[in-house]
Amino acid sequence: MTISMEYRGVQKISGPLIFVEGVTNVGYNELVEVRGEEGGLRRGRVLEINRGIAAVEVFEGTTGLSTTGTSVKFQGKPLMVPLSTEMLGRVFNGLGEPADGGPTPFTEDYRDVNGLPMNPYARDYPTQFIQTGVSAIDGMDTLVRGQKLPIFSGSGLPHNLIATQVARQATIVGEEVSFAVVFVAMGIKHDEAAFFRRSFEESGALKNSALFLNLADDPPVERLVTPRSALTLAEYLAFEQDMHVLVILTDMTNYAEALREISAAREEVPSRKGYPGYLYSDFASIYERAGRIRGRKGSITQMPVLTMPNDDITHPIPDLTGYITEGQLVVDRDLHRRGIYPPINILPSLSRLMKDGIGKGKTREDHGPVASQLYSAYSRAQDLRALSTIIGEEGLTDKDRAYLRFGESFEQRFLNQRYDENRSLETTLDMAWSELSLLPESELTRIPDRFVKAYYKRA
Amino acid sequence: MTIQGRIIKISGPVIQAEGASGLEMHELAMVGEEELIGEVVRVEGDLATVQVYEDTVGLKPGEKVEGSGMPLAVELGPGLLQGIFDGIQRPLTVIREITGDYVKRGVKTAALSKEKKWHFVPTKKKGETVSGGAVIGRIQETPIFEHRILVPPNRSGVLEFVAKEGDYTIEDVIAMVSHEGTTHDLRMYHRWPVREPRPYVERLEPSEPLITGQRIIDMFFPVAKGGAVTIPGGFGTGKTITSHQLAAWSDSEIILYIGCGERGNEMTEVLLTFPEWKDPKSGRPLMERTVLIANTSNMPVAAREASIYTGVTIAEYFRDMGYNVAVMADSTSRWAEALREISGRLEEMPAEEGYPSYLASRIGEFYERAGRVRTLGGSYGSVSLIGAVSPGGGDFSEPVTVHTKRFVRAFWALDTTLASMRHYPAINWLTSYSEYTDYVEKWWNDHTEGRWRELRLRALDILKREDELKEVIRLIGPEALPESEKLLMETARLLREGFLQQNAYDPIDTYSSPEKQFKLLTTMLSFHNIASKAVSKGVTAAKIASLQSVTDMAKLRMSIPNDKASEIDLFLEKVSSDIDQLVEGKS
Ligand SMILES: Nc1ncnc2c1ncn2[C@@H]1O[C@H](COP(=O)(O)OP(=O)(O)O)[C@@H](O)[C@H]1O
Ligand SMILES: [Mg+2]
């Protein structure tokens, strides 16, 4: 039996933190129960212990707590979540408790939400191509099973549409199994959450999904726990129950802001833009929970979504994310304004694991060189587009004009597709060749001759 | 006597203990009832502050903190190669056997196997006098690597005993040395503190290039054996792939790859590909000369700080056997951030961007461990350091990039724009530099008909002219350029696409022998001379550029394997005769 000691010595309350004095036998990062005068139960965890004073972050916030009327109980263990396959088809709050009025799922296992670092020696390298049916992704920045590939977006851009289209269409060609979806909302609006829910419902994915919701009006500090509870379930489903799990985390910007709030309350020395120096490691403790393990069947594929403040990709949130994730899909305001969906700007986008998921026997043998040539040509077209607005098209060479036509067509036909359009990889690559065929053959320097012979101007 | 204190403060990876007077700076300490491994980073009266190399969740005030009387050290001996270790040299393979697929804390395991037997061949005899660093025997550790057994740097004297040839574990005594009346047992391994550079006789100037097989590096921004280089770049610009390429192809005898605070999958990739890739010289798997250190971004942050030192100390050990060793540290920024985090927890006064004021001196000390030396044993060895830097927001004016620049002599600036065009390696040829060119010129001249300097300067000049002309084009458009300048633009493009770009995933292109590099560059520059003459006779640059043989020239890097490099000459003849035909058509 664990005896949990009750304390009344709250010395100070600062932002989401309370400081409890005179504590003994309290462990770092331990779970805490906090009760205010009104009697409602809140929870929190120990962030620091210094000479008998424990700093506790309260997930539900400190509004209404006082130094005199608050009692605190230390639980002697970190925050744990109950786990079971029955959690699929259900909705939970940010701490992982049922929030759909249904019964508590039958518990099969019980685990610390913080997880443990996967041994790099135990990892298996992700190599299986996931067809999303979206040309910009499949053709240019291919997703593979076990990858972490975020969407870098901006407010008002259609990242939710892209994420749900991917969740709905993602398949492994030639395999029957579909993905189980773990959806994690952090500080997003009610209508956004409703959109996701409806879209899972319509596609029939809901029964195979678990939704963890911390919405915009839910306590911000709770957001620090939400992705961890959800990923603990994802790990259980993937590595104990052999499932392929797709985890959508939205919006990591709200998560990072909650972390900044705690850091400010602790009066820590900030690094860039007021974010704590450990934002990188903290993000890593979430993103690195994607992957595969040798000898186990399941996998965790992550698609985090974040909105870049002021569309600035150098902001610490996208920047540190990009340093950890295996690429990024960058949603572009200009393409969106011009009516192109999905408005994914391929130039700053990247899939680091693409090379291992494509090519002969996986997608098609010309896939890599074709993508590389498209990047190079589109980048040239963009430069020429800027140039032609200054000097006019007349000042360009014939070859340059071919590039301009290519750029236009690439956006309008290759990138652009319907929200419900599910293109096969063959279609995507054939379309790619018809774009490349707008260029003179001598421009295709990145493609081996045998592919040029087989596909150029053949479509 | 062991010193024991009690924890009074826990803040992330940093704890403070009271009643701990007597603990020394940088002493290894055991923290808590689980005896987590830590290192003393501050002592003050009877208070000691310890950075803990393992997760501190659940640790409680009042738990004990015990000194070990020893500094943090690594085990140096046979069994290092082909291994993957964590930041404090625990083998991740053994950790997996003990704790499964996830790394749990509190694992106590030796770095090197104490059971495995090695075939020892003595090279010294009883009665001989030896000093620190002398080779007393050897072991064929892998088919391509002879491990030389060294007298530890701090031992010397007369050999009282030398084991005869045979199979021994590293715990077996293989020699005894006596000095001033005391006799010491020597084993096939010894320990050395990671924060203390290993001694040598003298430092030497660099003289040979570290051939990397990467064209832009070897030809334009070379690094010497024993040199120090940095690879700064925003995310996705190619730091890791460049580091992998150097680990795979550089002509070092030993590779130390330190994955410092980066992705788990990148270590997995090395573990999967290196046993399959073959060393271009010996044809043996690359793994047989490689040691991996992994503290991935989700592993404890304090061990990240240590991982760099663990790696470089092992590198110095191999150097001391007389080998050329190359160390890749990806990324030193994560190490600097670990320093920052610990410093913040120690409530030190921060300097720029929250980094401690001693950041620059720590970076300096690290890169100073690079160098070519005459070893204590009298041979020559080198440690080359290649450190990736991950500047926040890709901004090279941030503290880690700025301070690193002061201590390295080559700078391979990775460029986000080039990366977004998929121009790889995205090393910017206008902003990168190397101060090693003068040192390595002689080697190249001996291997390339004495034309290395001339060729590279000529090519760099064309690329620089291209950049200037781009400015002009922005004002007047490409059509308004004179034909000679249009040709220069075409040649520059050829150099970019056919020489500077190098696809790490193309089986032929991934490694270019010095001969192939030289021939490619000669061919392209000769093309420029021939084409210039044709242009002066009225042939347009566009006509020349659309010749099939010119397009093919841009693909030679992928189509001609290293052992057929001489075929590149035939190509020049073809291009030359095609251009002649154009000239004839004119007259
Ligand atoms: N030499 C190269 N050849 C081919 N692709 C490359 C090369 N260098 C980089 N890349 C591509 O760029 C991506 C990012 O490179 P990486 O080294 O992981 O970047 P960083 O470490 O700077 O974030 C890789 O996944 C790969 O697709
Ligand atoms: Mg990297």
Image (cartoon, coloured by chain):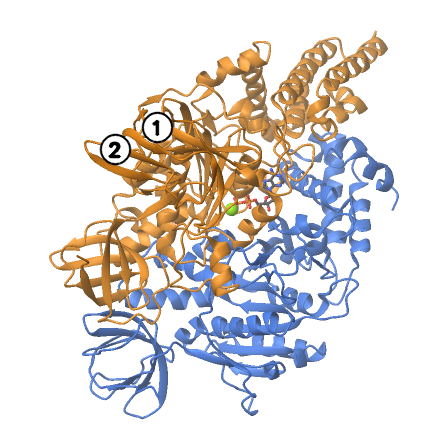
Chain colours: A blue, B orange
Q: Quadrant of the N terminus of chain A?
A: bottom left
3D distance between C-alphas at marks 2 and 1 = 11 Å
Question: Depth check: A448 or A348 in front?
Answer: A448
Q: Nearer the viewer, residue B466 or B46?
A: B46
- The numbered dot on residue B126 is 1
In the rendered structure, which disc, 2 or 1, sits on the residue that comes first in sequence? 1
Amino acid at circle 1: Lys
The residue carrying mark 2 has its beta carbon less than 8 Å from ligand 2: no
Q: Are marks 2 and 1 in contact (CB under 8 Å)?
A: no
Residue B372: image quadrant is top left
- Examine the rendered structure and indicate whether residue B195 appears above or below residue B428: below
Residue type at mark 2: give it: Ser
Q: Is residue A118 at all visible to an observer of this figure?
A: no
Residue B378: in sight, yes or no? Answer: yes
Chain of the residue where label 1 is placed in the rendered structure: B
Q: Give the residue at mark 2.
A: B178
Q: Residue furthest top?
A: B587
> For the point 27% across and 38% down, which residue is it?
B184
Pick whichever, A368 or B537, lies toward us: A368
Which residue in the rendered view is the most extreme toward the left? B45
Q: Residue at 63% of width from left, 51% of height from top?
A: A353
Kindly report which numbered mark, 2 or 1, lies closer to the viewer in this rendering. 1
From this view, report whether residue B412 is shown above or below residue B389: above
Position of residue A89 in the picture relative to residue B95 (left or right): right
- Estimate how packed mark 1 is, as few (under 14), some (14 to 19) or many (20 or more) residues with alpha carbons within 10 Å: some
Q: In what element is the residue under mark 2?
A: strand
Q: Are marks 2 and 1 on the same chain?
A: yes
> Which residue, as the protein is rendered here, is positioned at the far right?
A458
